[in-house]
Amino acid sequence: MSLNIYGQNLDSRLLIGSALYPSPHVMKQAILASGSQVVTLSLKRQNPAEKSGQQIWHYLQEIVAQTNGHLLPNTAGCKTAKEAVTLAKMSREIFKTDWIKLEVIGDDYNLQPDPIELLNATEQLIADGFKVLPYCTDDLVLCQRLYDLGCQVIMPWASPIGTGKGLMNPYNLETIRLRLPEATLILDAGIGKPSDACLAMEMGYDGVLLNSAVALADNPVLMAKAFGQALQAGAQGYVAGIMQQRQTAHPSTPTLDTPFWHQNS
Amino acid sequence: MNIHINGKAYPLSNETHISVSSALTLHFIEPQQSTFAVALNGDFVGRTDYDTTMVKNGDSLDVLQPIQGG
């Protein structure tokens, strides 16, 4: 089983962020332990006196080389389509990729995406040849609009970025899966536990993108491994076919010829 | 004239405009060793256009570099 992102088949269904780790070394070890082949990163204003940016860049290049992986730049911090389009173009030049994790934030409190600016930016970027991976809310119609614009990959949130609250609206997420069977669906943001990732995969999602849940764990390397295994378990469970729930109990052990069965009734 | 690079003001007394290439020499210590991309007044400027794109009085240049991200 593999994850397909704009024609690229990847062995791992996990996309992982590179921020918030205790050190660059732990970041590298955790990403490698996760098995992920897609690492997200961003851009910030450069301070010429500061060398840390170059150092992180070298670490990320090493990770991508070792995993035969891909960089996925984001447009974090953008609040308008214009800002996001400019940042996407700058990212494409630096990182030599037309993949872009499109984030256009509409509210500072819960970092909720602005659906109108997001659609506007998506349209411009697709026209310019980008392969857009939009970070969006779990709104079915918004996801349909993004798909109609040409997004082969859509990334609804589980819950607000960095909260670790898990899947807030499972019904919405299941409906998006049901209504967009051809789209590659990646659950992005708000994942807290490996079981959250497993649940998304059991719903038939194609992948999960997370960062804080691994980076902020007591042991990020072990947690990265746990997420990799949870995704595998959930994906295999989905493919295997999960049994229908039933209203009443049914004995697992055959009752025919059971000694003493109903003897006293 | 005055230009801003990453929010910092650079007063230039003798020019009315300079190229993006020239403006970058004001900012960088070691430009050859840096990985960066540029926007002028919020619009992307491709590397091949640095010599021909002019920065004028009041313009703002953003020079961005890779960082960790989620």
Image: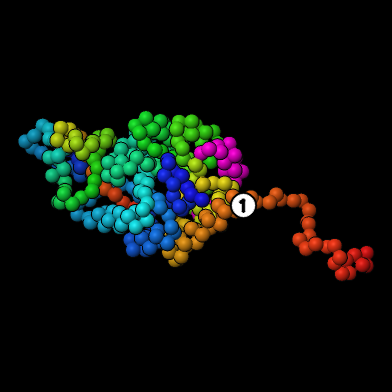
* A248 vs A221: above or below: above
Q: Is residue B8 left or right of residue A202?
A: left
Q: Is residue A140 visible?
A: yes
Q: Position of residue A70 (x, y in %)?
A: 36, 49
- Residue at the image point whose x is 46% and y is 37% from the top: A152
- Residue at the image point whose x is 41% and y is 34% from the top: A122
Q: Is residue A63 left or right of residue B36?
A: right
Of all residues shown, which one is farthest toward the bottom?
Answer: A259
Q: Is residue A116 visible?
A: no
* A125 vs A74: above or below: above
Q: Which residue is mark 1?
A: A240
- Residue at the image point whose x is 34% and y is 57% from the top: A66
Q: Which chain letter matches label 1?
A: A
The stretch drawn in magenta includes residue B21: no
Which residue occupies the foreground of this view, A123 or B2?
A123
Which residue occupies the foreground of this view, A30 or A216?
A30
Based on the displayed image, in which of its 4 quarters is residue A49 positioned?
A: bottom left
Q: Position of residue A21 (x, y in %)?
A: 38, 60
Based on the displayed image, in which of its 4 quarters is residue B24 positioned?
A: top left
Number of numbered discs on residues: 1
- Residue at the image point whose x is 46% and y is 44% from the top: A4
Question: Is disc 1 placed on a helix, strand or loop?
Answer: helix
Question: On the rendered image, what quadrant is the C terminus of chain A found in?
Answer: bottom right
Which residue occupies the foreground of this view, A259 or A137?
A259
Mark 1 residue type? Ala
10 Å crowding of disc 1: few (<14), some (14-19), many (20+): few
Which residue occupies the foreground of this view, B14 or B67?
B67
Q: Is residue A250 left or right of residue A188?
A: right
The boundaries of the magenta stretch are: A164-183
Q: Is residue A241 left or right of residue B1?
A: right
